[in-house]
């Protein structure tokens, strides 16, 4: 029911596109893919974002090799102190 809102947040039409995929033992899932023009291999995820993705993969019992790949992704500290602390508080409350 919140797909339209999520599309805006994820940037559909502004460098990203959405597609529905079928996952074994899970069902359908929407994923967001960057347009080639928006891919920059030098970028690293913020530490809090990495933590959310990793926890989600662990909670949903993704294959261990995939979880390890996520765990090994290099990340950076978010320079926006408020955003970092707000997201860390959400992470810590779960």
Image (cartoon, rainbow, N blue to C red):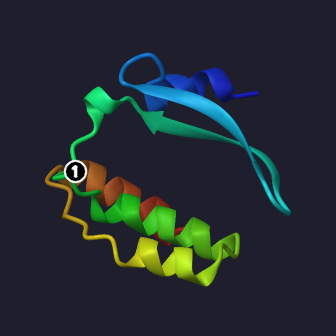
Left or right: residue 39 versus residue 93 is: left
Horizontal and vertical percent position of residue 26: 82, 58
Q: Is residue 94 visible?
A: no
Number of other residues with Cα within 10 Å of mark 1, as a class: few under 14, some 14 to 19, many 20 or more: few
Left or right: residue 37 versus residue 52 is: left
Q: Quadrant of the C terminus?
A: bottom right
Indicate whether 63 appears above or below 14: below
x 42%, y 68%: residue? 51
Residue 24, by quadrant, is bottom right
Horizontal and vertical percent position of residue 10: 47, 32
- The image shows a total of numbered marks equal to 1
Horizontal and vertical percent position of residue 71: 41, 77
Q: Which residue is mark 1?
A: 41
Give whichever of 88, 39 is nearer the camera: 39
Indicate whether 41 appears above or below 31: below
Left or right: residue 86 versus residue 40 is: right
x 54%, y 68%: residue? 93
Residue 15, by quadrant, is top left
Q: Is residue 49 visible?
A: yes
x 44%, y 16%: residue? 13
Q: Secondary structure at mark 1?
A: loop
Q: Quadrant of the N terminus?
A: top right
Horizontal and vertical percent position of residue 6: 57, 30
Give whichever of 5, 88 is nearer the camera: 5
Give whichever of 20, 78 is nearer the camera: 20
x 36%, y 54%: residue? 86
Residue at the farthest front position: 36
Indicate whether 1 appears above or below 81: above
Residue at the farthest top position: 13
């Amino acid at each position: 029911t919140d797909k339209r809102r999520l599309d805006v947040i994820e940037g559909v039409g502004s460098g990203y596109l959405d597609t529905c995929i079928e996952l074994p033992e899970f069902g359908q899932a929407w994923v967001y893919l960057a347009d080639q023009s928006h891919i920059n291999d030098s970028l690293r995820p913020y530490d809090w974002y990495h933590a959310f993705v990793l926890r989600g993969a662990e909670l949903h019992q993704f294959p261990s090799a995939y979880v390890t790949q996520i765990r090994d992704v290099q990340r950076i500290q978010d320079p926006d102190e408020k955003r970092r602390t707000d997201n860390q508080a959400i992470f810590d409350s779960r």
